[in-house]
Amino acid sequence: MADVANYTIENNSGANVRIDLNNVFSAIQSSNSKSTDLVSSQCVAGMPFLNTTSKVLKIRNSNNTSFTDIGNIDQANLGLLPATGGTMTGVLQCATGAANAPSLHFGSSGTGFYQDAANIIGFGGSGNLSFKFSNSGIDFIGARPARFFDSDSTHYVALQSTGTVTSNRTITLPNESGTVLTSSSTIPTSQLSGGSVTIGSTSINLGAAATSITGLTELTVTTLNATNQNINNIKNAGGANESTADQIYEGRAKIWVNFNGTNTTIRDDFGVTSVGDHGVGIYQLNFDTNFSSTDYCPTGFVHRNGSTGGRVLCHIDTYNQINVGSYRFMVSGTNNGSNVGLSVVDVTHAFVAIHGDQ
């Protein structure tokens, strides 16, 4: 193009005016093209300009202080992304935005993406922060659930935080395939990998009660609650002091009592309902549970009533009142060691224990 200093046609000879006109028209026709940017004296606000070196079409700004790039004339759409879409080769930078004014939205100004903080992208839904994306993971805000829909998208399984968490918690999935079961699972057996579990050498169907478990060498429990336990041997924590269940049952006292014979007050007992007073030195123990027969074995002992003088020797005589639900006996003693005659006596301390089958 002809490099014109300005667009003014000066008075001159006809030939020179014609030359001046041709140069101006040539500059206009080529968008004032030149290999270097025009100097300010050659420019007016709004004029176009083509830099033939960079192939960039420009336009002078409204203040006539500089040019604003429009695009490269050798590229389709001047290198600009058309409204119909295309491929961007550069970086698109958006404003920071906010939850109620996301910088990237899809027609709803209250729903979209924005920068919540440095290196954190927030998603605002209906003007509120819903979740965040960062290098630490995805944060679901306000106890919002993560919902996983089934194959036809009619129902879902949701993972959700409780309303209040006292400290951060992490649930780590196992390195295996399968179904996660909880205490309230209602997953059919047919959907599980295997319908039973094996304890020791005993296979137990899921949901079934185990009546017996074999194949266990040793079972250590902190607390064992059961209605009935069939046990062959019982040992201490070191595996010693073995006893059978029969030895324990036959060897332990089914009944024992410590009572005051002067008023039949029970100090402590096991298996005794009450102590009856049937006269001086005559007592009856009433049992919580009947014995299976009257062939049980009672043993007893009493303290003497005084440390000096009085009755110093006491023993228990049966009173021919042995029943499955009670036992009556008599306490008698002597006044001194040389007197072998016995007389009934109330004592302050009486102790009785009974072994047998119930």
Image: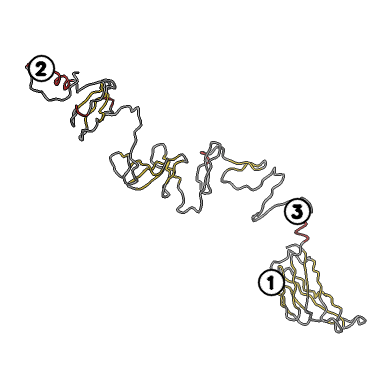
- Mark 3 vs mark 2, CA separation in Å: 126 Å
Q: Is residue 308 left or right of residue 109?
A: right
Of badges 3 and 2, nearer the viewer stands 2
Residue at x 46% of width, y 54% of height:
164
The residue at the far left in this view is: 14
Question: Quick one: label 2, few (<14), some, or many (20+) residues within 10 Å?
Answer: few
Q: Which residue is mark 1?
A: 273
Given residues 299 and 115, the one toward you in this image is 115
Q: Is residue 185 left or right of residue 354?
A: left
Q: Which mark is residue 16?
A: 2
Question: Quick one: label 1, few (<14), some, or many (20+) residues within 10 Å?
Answer: some
Query: Is 204 rendered above or below residue 275?
Result: above
**Could you say which quadrant of the image residue 131 lies in?**
top left
Mark sitting earlier along the chain (3/2): 2
Q: Which mark is residue 236?
A: 3
At label 3, the amino acid type is Asn
Given residues 301 and 97, the one toward you in this image is 97
